Amino acid sequence: MISFAPLPTPLVPARMWERLEREHHAWIMFPDEHNEGTANSAAKALLSPVEINRYQRYRRAQDRLLFLVAHAGVRTALSHYGDISAKDWDFSTSPQGRPEIANKDAPPGLRFNLSHTAGMAVVLVHRDKDAGVDVERLHRVKDLTSMSKMVFSPEEQADFASCSQAEQPERFLRYWTLKEAYTKARGMGLKLPLQEFSFELGHSPEFFPPRISFAPGFPDSPQQWHFLTTKMSGTHFLAIATREKKQPPGAALFFRHPLNTGFL
Ligand SMILES: CC(C)(COP(=O)(O)OP(=O)(O)OC[C@H]1O[C@@H](n2cnc3c(N)ncnc32)[C@H](O)[C@@H]1OP(=O)(O)O)[C@@H](O)C(=O)NCCC(=O)NCCS
């Protein structure tokens, strides 16, 4: 379990950006703490026309709220690192779908990755390095074993099968979030062949960080990759993948996004 770091006061963007040289920051948001009424006006004030269009297309109130909190969360989190107001961030999308900052006057090397699921959203803010984040909620999935055969490497499948039935849902989500975080750090999403890279979790994955290995011929090497897996709020699993050029690698810091303290 991670603990939240205190928010620096005052929050000076230039200093926050400097800190990203040796840290990466995960801003956590809990959509259930907001209501759609107030969220609606915040959406209009903060989101771009393209985002508002996506927001309005969701049918269910809880999906609209999650979208709003996540995307308003990206914008407000990024404004802690650069002198650009939340509504003025511009984004472009890579050919594989990864959103990137497009403002010419953004701090050089500033990047982010977003993940959202029922009950939680997280924005990972990083600088220069490649990084990805994934969060998933623990929920009933009917047949985890058949799913594991579709998405896990042979080594992961064997480890998953050796777990007791009670342990399997948690083991599944640790592997799954790590795999997604890695594919998102590569900017490829699920276009990467999921069975051709493999995580070694061990018995205490929160204390002994997972390691990655690749099938022969897979175009990547394990050096420079660092991973974190953690259980949050009892019901969510979160993983972070970073490819770092520096030794020692940057530290992950978790902030509770001030969206939760009355921003909306
Ligand atoms: C990116 C991808 C991995 C999305 O994963 P996801 O778990 O559904 O969603 P997350 O909330 O973690 O991430 C979504 C965000 O990732 C970002 N994203 C999109 N494409 C991305 C890419 N190629 N690389 C990195 N990030 C990407 C976006 O910000 C997106 O948010 P938005 O759509 O609200 O703008 C995508 O490739 C995908 O197709 N996912 C399908 C999920 C699936 O099949 N899950 C089965 C669960 S067992």
Image (spheres, grey):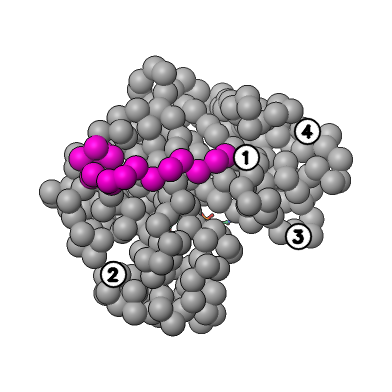
The amino acid marked with disc number 1 is Met
Disc 1 marks which residue?
1
Disc 4 marks which residue?
158
Number of labels in the image equals 4
> On the picture, is 204 further left or further right than 127?
right
Alpha carbon of mark 3 to alpha carbon of mark 1: how far? 22 Å
| Mark closer to the observer (4, 1) | 1
**Residue, x 40% and y 57% (percent of image)?**
258
Q: Position of residue 4 (x, y in %)?
A: 50, 43
| Mark closer to the observer (3, 4) | 3
Q: Is residue 208 above or below residue 31?
A: above
Magenta span includes 11:
yes
Q: Position of residue 157 (x, y in %)?
A: 74, 37
Mark found first going from the N terminus, 2 or 3: 2
Magenta span includes 10:
yes
Span of residues in magenta: 1-17
| Mark closer to the observer (2, 3) | 2
Q: Indicate which disc residue 140 carries.
A: 3
Q: Are marks 3 and 1 in contact (CB under 8 Å)?
A: no
The amino acid marked with disc number 2 is Leu
Q: Secondary structure at mark 3?
A: loop
Disc 2 marks which residue?
46
Alpha carbon of mark 2 to alpha carbon of mark 3: how far? 35 Å
Crowd tier of the residue under label 2, counting other residues whose Cα lies within 10 Å: few below 14, some 14–19, many 20 or above: many
Alpha carbon of mark 1 to alpha carbon of mark 2: how far? 32 Å
